[in-house]
Amino acid sequence: MHLLIISFCIILLVVLITKLKVNAFLAFLVIAIIAGILLGMDIDTIIVSIRKGIGQLLGSLLIIIVSGAMLGKLVAESGAAQQITNGMMKVFGTRYIQWALMATGFVIGIPLFYNVGFVLAVPLVFAVAYQNKIPVVFLGISMLASLSVTHGFLPPHPAPTALVGQFHADIGKTLLYGIMIAIPTVILAGPIFASTLKKIKSQPLETFNPPSLPQDQLPGLSNSLISALLPVLLLATTAICQPMLPSEGNLKKFISFISDADIVMLLSLIVATFTLGIGRKMSAAKIMNAYHEAVKDVALILLIVAGSGALKEILIDSGVGNEIAMSVQSFNLNPLLLGWLIAVIIRVSIGSATVAGLTAAGIIAPVLTATHTNPNLMVLAVGAGSLMFSHVNDAGFWLYKEYFNLSMKDTFLSWSLMETIVSIGGLIGVFILEAFI
């Protein structure tokens, strides 16, 4: 019954947005209330859940998205994106630029949280597409497939790291196995799948359309790379340093503080303001105007993401995710397939990959112990399941749709199918490894 209610609410949400042209934020709020009532939640707790969902999701994304948009705008306005693109084209050429972006996404995706990597990488994709007249979706899917796989499969991302602890897996082996599965999965979901998307038309946000400047007015390549990729450098450096430091002491606290994603993005923005702006004689007024334009362009994205958070919290607080997953646990299946399937059902029902992975872990853990299944492979199976078919109840779906300015249909045909390929490809990779381990 609960599955029917969820299906009805998701279909109604799609109809409101696509057919009736209701603002997505308002549609999410209406559907969240309807879902709460139909799922039997107390009326007094529905609004509490909605506020909690909006607050938690915006609280975790607001600084990252806004500062990332500002950084992306400055990288575009200063000519740094143009300089980076020129450098990439000299090394890889137009023929292999898609593979270069895929590799870049994989490298920066390992240390970066998905949302940070998204707002950092997407402006580079747009810059390459604009300057070389290449379809934006064709390029973007390759990089975003890399970011998605690292987010779901590989420590130190929150869900895989938490799964390692819950399953008592070995983080080193999990990372090694994860990379072995991730590389072919990214190639399949990235360049190979993206080759079918060249006909999808996309006109991304104007804020990331970089001006074409003369070569002598561009910042240096080193300055451009360091300023644009400073979040990656900071996170990677702090991740390496933290295990080497004593568990107690002010230095440990300081490193933990500056390794927080919000602080990393703020520090990177401050540095870029000087290295790409003030240090190159750009007026403070011009810099702040660029930031103002960037905020206006992502305001609607923030509202839509907030709305998806409200619906997600209703589904979590109603307990429907756990109930559906528990009913699946009685199936007589391979434990790895069962773990993947539970994560898939929760992911499709609730939307959050992290919630899907962690909820599935609590359910499958007793099965893992009883069947002596390899815990490292179970981390990867559940992680792959948690990425399945991202759609309207997932914040990542709306980030992609709004940044790339796509229709609902084209978002499903590109983003949702890419996530599905990642999930199924990851499961196949787990089974292949199981045969040899």
Image: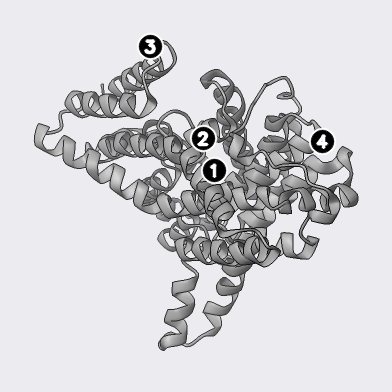
The colour mode here is one colour
Disc assigned to residue 384: 1
Instruction: Examine the image and state in which quarter residue 45 appears.
Output: top left
Which residue lies under the disc numbered 3? 20
Q: In what element is the residue under mark 2?
A: loop
First in sequence: mark 3 or mark 2? 3
Q: Is residue 49 above or below residue 410?
A: below
Q: Nearer the viewer, residue 141 or 170?
A: 141
Q: In what element is the residue under mark 3?
A: loop
Q: In this view, does 100 lie above or below 170?
A: above
Disc assigned to residue 132: 4
Instruction: Examine the image and state in which quarter residue 165 appears.
Output: bottom left
CA–CA distance in space, label 4 to label 2: 32 Å
The answer to whether the residue labelled 4 contacts the one labelled 2, judged by CB atoms less than 8 Å apart, is: no
Q: What crowding class fits label 1: few (fewer than 14 Cα within 10 Å), some (14-19), or many (20 or more)? A: many
CA–CA distance in space, label 3 to label 2: 27 Å
> Which mark is nearer the camera, 3 or 2?
3
> Which mark is nearer the camera, 1 or 4?
4
Q: What residue type is labelled 2?
A: Met
Q: In what element is the residue under mark 4?
A: helix
**What percent of the width, then of the height, locates residue 257?**
44, 73
**What percent of the width, then of the height, locates residue 404?**
59, 32
Q: Which amino acid does label 4 sit on?
A: Asn
72 left or right, relative to 340: right
The answer to whether the residue labelled 2 contacts the one labelled 1, judged by CB atoms less than 8 Å apart, is: yes
First in sequence: mark 1 or mark 4? 4
Which residue lies under the disc numbered 2? 388
CA–CA distance in space, label 1 to label 4: 34 Å
